[in-house]
Image (spheres, helix red, strand yellow):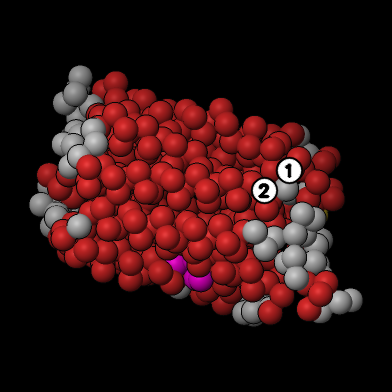
Amino acid sequence: MFKPKRIVKLADAVELPRWQRPNSLLILFAIAMPLAFSTWVALMNNFVKEVGGFTGVELGWQQSLREVPGFLAIGVIAIIIFVREQVLAVISLLMLALAVMVTGQFTSFSGILLTTVISSVGFHYYETVNQSLQLQWIDKARAPQTLGWLVAAGSGTSLVVYGLLVASWKTFDLAYNTVYMIGGGASVLLILFAWFAYPQFEAPHPQLKKMVLRKRYWLYYALQFMSGARRQIFMVFAAFMMVEHFGFEVHEVTALFLINFLANMIFAPIMGHVIARVGERNALTFEYVGLTIVFLLYGGIYYFGWGVVLAAVLYVVDHLFFALAFALKTYFQKIADPGDIAPTAAVAFTINHIAAVFLPASLGYLWIVSPSAVFILAAGMAMTSLCLALMIPRHPAPGNETRFSQVLAPA
């Protein structure tokens, strides 16, 4: 099935029909992934609480195990010695979709952990090679705008998934297993189409197939580390707060997700144009200031007893700020050697998940004692990210990776 077909050089891809070009395949990937993953996310908090009987402790362990494959994403470097990145993207997506399909049939603690880990391997390996393919296939001059449209395509797909769940969950009294089968199955069909309908694209710069750690990328590595730590608190505990503290049901949680992705679908392309105009430093500064305020207000919900409306608004605003994170991708694209993109994507994913492996489990215990303390910690992480983002130069480039590069290591 996975025997490579025709190989088309990237420069020659313009001769293909528009729907069969590299950017179109990236859009197809951007649609196929959330068909499975958004289905998993939309149901998971309620699924583990109602079916698995999870508390914050079990949830923390589940999320920590889910991040282990992300920590091991550096293994992608070994795999692409034997398998093309585009092929690995398809295989990884297929693993994610199939795992989501069977999630509803594994209801024990160990069963939920098993399907979580398998789907996570697919998700994280796909995300690693997908980031590499995006930066290789997308022209630098159009990268922020194109990445914005890719985010919008994924958000639009998630919007459809969540909209259908909101409209049909109670109306048709759907079972968890039914929804998982439909979401995962639809993703499988798109992935198979992506395999059979598209040629293999070959970028002009061969990628190094060994681990790359360069001193001049240190700021990118540091920002990736802080991003992973901060993201875990949002992904794990912000949504769980809505279920545990405010008693949200599946259709209510899904409605919140729906609003998030509708906002992303509208604003992500705009954000891409804004990043192209104001630069990565200003965009990331705005993001981290906003996230600091949001996390402090999250903490106040528990400490001062603020209501559900504020929590829901913060959740949407939080999600919008995270949509600016693709500025980190374009920053790296501007400073990287072309052959470093694939191995550095794998290294960056591993760095991004260092904190993700231990934070959810450890913070699960803190959550039981003081949920507000978890969000105060996240605010501190956002402030640290802000300090790092201020070191990005206005026009990043090789040799100008930070605002101190010309002073510390002049050309």
Pointer 1 residue: 278
Residue displayed at 26% across by 23% down: 168
Task: Depth check: give the residue in front, 176 or 319.
Answer: 319
Task: Depth check: give the residue in front, 308 or 176.
Answer: 308
Q: Quadrant of residue 131?
A: bottom right
Tag 1, which secondary structure?
helix
Contact, CB < 8 Å: mark 1 with mark 2? yes
* Identity, as a three-letter code, of the amino acid under mark 1: Val
List x then y, in percent, for residue 322: 50, 46
Q: Quadrant of residue 405?
A: bottom right
Q: Quadrant of residue 218?
A: bottom right
Pointer 2 residue: 282
Residue displayed at 23% across by 33% down: 307
Residue displayed at 37% across by 32% down: 313
Give the magenta-colored segment's residue range: 349-353
List x then y, in percent, for residue 229: 42, 63
List x then y, in percent, for residue 23: 69, 42
List x then y, in percent, for residue 102: 27, 49
Q: Is residue 92 visible?
A: no
**Number of callouts:** 2
* Identity, as a three-letter code, of the amino acid under mark 2: Asn
Left or right: where does residue 251 sit relative to residue 290?
left
Up the image or down, 411 lies above or below 26; here it is: below
Callout 1 crowding tier (Cα within 10 Å): few <14, some 14–19, many ≥20: few
Q: Is residue 35 visible?
A: yes
Q: Report the Cα–Cα distance between label 1 and label 2.
A: 6 Å
The quarter in which the C terminus is drawn is bottom right
Tag 2, which secondary structure?
helix
Callout 2 crowding tier (Cα within 10 Å): few <14, some 14–19, many ≥20: some
